[in-house]
Amino acid sequence: MTRGAGAPARALGLALAGAAALVASGGFGTPALATLGAGLIALPVLVTLVVWVAASGLRVERRLAPARCPAGDEVRITAHRSGWAHRTGLDRLLDVDVDPGLGTARGPGEPVPTRDGWILTAVRGDHRLPPPRVTVRDPFGLARRSRAGGGDDRLLVVPAAPAIGRMPLGMRAPGRGPRRRRADSGFGELDRVREYQAGDPLSRVHWAQTAKRGRLQTKELRAPEGSGRSTLVLLDGAGPPGEDFETAVTAAAALARHLCAAGEPVALSHTGRTPARITSALATWPVIEVALARVEAGGSRGAALALAGEAGGPDAPDTAIVVTSAGDPALPAAVARARARGTGVAVVVSGPAAAGAGDLMAAGAEVVVIPGPGRVASALSAAPAPAGAVAR
């Protein structure tokens, strides 16, 4: 856990000057030069020894308060020194610098020094922090030594989830008729009987109606009331990182939190860099909150493909709320297909995705446009634009 930094050029220069003085004293027979040369050689050696010994007896531990917080909150970072070098006051005779270990490319935030530590405004994410480092130097700049510390190494910054006073979104989102299970799902209640089509599994053949009509008949099933019915919050993670994507994450968090607080069955799916899906049987607000803290933009699967997969699956939700900041030209067609299957669709758009609001309305989706990061709660609490409305 030690990273030593060799003697700086200044110490090496002194040692070379001392060696030159010793050589010169032999040549000129000047004892004073010998004394000077010995001193110039001994000084960097002794200083380096003191610095290395002091660094070996010094420990630093980082503390985060709090270690879990919503995005935008302030986090206080302190670095506590310990060890015999601190107890004896040896570190006070030397220059000691502490790096809090927060300077990563997509880190938790930019630390601002204070009198007793640092403060940062937290950025959403599950941050694994590198260890802090303490560097000990002598006042003359002749030697230094750096050591890694310990302490808190994780900062979980969950998305802000503003409270929604009321949520009219989804009230007019149902599809065109009863939600049906796929004919080959093997679950659900009998919805209707139709003519057999090539590819229908024989297990779904209605033999009584086949005998009565003289032609193969297939059963179509639908989900019984109250069995696995849920609202799906589908976050599009295919867009680039940035303020628009963070606004979409905040909107998804606000929706999921509101539905969980209301006791509604809710599932979460996102198409971020590492896609995730949490079923309604497992989705509690703490689980969803952590999943949204970890989502990263830049996924390879767009909202249209994700919606098609959800609406065409055996556990298709009653209502899918798609939250997107990336414009997907295939999304309106996916909305129309999902509604034809019986899944209602609402879409929350921000950033570039807002340009496609009109096409989404024409496809039958309720649409909410979020104008900016500070207007998530007010936009979601307002009545959504219904199908056929004109986007402005």
Image: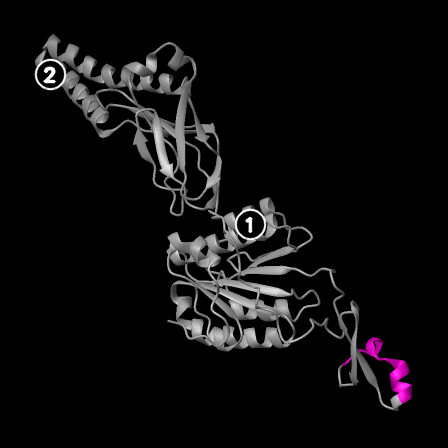
Q: Say above or below: 261 vs 326.
A: above
Instruction: Determine whether label 2 and label 1 are within 8 Å by CB.
Output: no
Q: Say above or below: 64 vs 386.
A: above
Identify the magenta region.
Answer: 200-212
Residue at 59% in and 53% down:
259
* Residue 65: x %, y % from top left: 45, 31
Q: Which mark is residue 230?
A: none
Identify the image quadrant of residue 90: top left
Confirm whether residue 297 shows in the render. no
Residue at 47% in and 28% down:
150
Say which label, 2 or 1, has the lower sequence index: 2
Q: Can you tell which of label 2 and label 1 is closer to the viewer?
A: 1
At mark 1, the secondary structure is helix
Q: Which mark is residue 27?
A: 2
* Residue 201: x %, y % from top left: 80, 78
Identify the image quadrant of residue 58: top left
Q: Amino acid at mark 1?
A: Arg
